[in-house]
Amino acid sequence: MDTHDMVPGSGGHSAGILVAVGANLSRRTGEGPLQTCHWAVAEIGHIDTIRVEAVSCWYESAPIPPSGQPPYVNGMVRLSGDITPEALLSALQDIEARAGRVRTIANAARPLDLDIIAMGDLVRAGPDPIVPHPRACLRAFVLLPLRDVAPDWRDPVSGAGIDTLLARVADQQITRLPG
């Protein structure tokens, strides 16, 4: 592990560690997508060396790219703490597996999808995970919940702020869920 890949979850102007949470199928235990997302947030809170600082509102969005899949429930979690990108990815993939996710084809429907969106100001093209997430700035279902937990966030690659990025995806279908 390179020490430059150890990412403190707070400090400077960093928004910490941002993880997108999404689901559009029921979990193997029968809970629907929203309940699975709540369960996933609780599980993320059990990862050693990090803690949940904020959870966004929940949103419903159409799948991207468009498909015959059911709509997704999406949210964002802001974390703090010290963890490597590889360790975080491994922990998130373990949570996905426990929810019943089986990786098949890209963009397939799934009971849980956990994506590392950003880890402070870290920019890395590889190895996996790529940080920040390469498609995060193209997805309203990422950006709206991200604004809930980190309204001053700027893309560490382009420097663009959240409102500028949201204006670019204004045509994407997304609805805030009640509650």
Image (cartoon, rainbow, N blue to C red):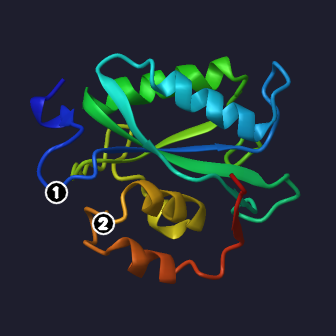
Residue under circle 1? 13
Residue 81: percent from left, percent from top: 25, 30
Which disc, if any, is residue 121? Answer: none
Q: Identity of the amino acid at label 1? A: His
- Give me the C-alpha separation between circle 1 and circle 2: 9 Å
Q: How many numbered marks does the figure carry?
A: 2
Could you say whether the residue bearing mark 2 is in a helix, strand or loop? loop
**x 44%, y 23%: residue:** 90
Residue 111: percent from left, percent from top: 74, 34
* CA neighbours of label 1 inside 10 A, class few (<14), some (14 to 19), many (20+): few
User: Is any part of residue 1 visible from this angle?
Assistant: yes
Q: Identity of the amino acid at label 2? A: Asp
Q: Is residue 155 left or right of residue 59?
A: left
Image quarter where the N terminus lies is: top left
Q: Is residue 36 above or below residue 11?
A: above
Residue situated furthest front in the rendering: 179
Residue 59: percent from left, percent from top: 66, 57
Residue under circle 2? 152
Determine the image quadrant of residue 151: bottom left
Q: Is residue 124 left or right of residue 177?
A: left
Q: Is residue 82 left or right of residue 70?
A: left
Q: Is residue 58 above or below residue 102?
A: below
Q: Nearer the viewer, residue 112 or 13?
A: 13
**x 69%, y 23%: residue:** 99
Of labels 1 and 2, earlier in sequence is 1
Residue 150: percent from left, percent from top: 36, 57
Q: Nearer the viewer, residue 100 or 19?
A: 19
User: Is any part of residue 111 visible from this angle?
Assistant: no
Q: Disc 1, disc 2: CB below 8 Å?
A: yes
**x 29%, y 20%: residue:** 49
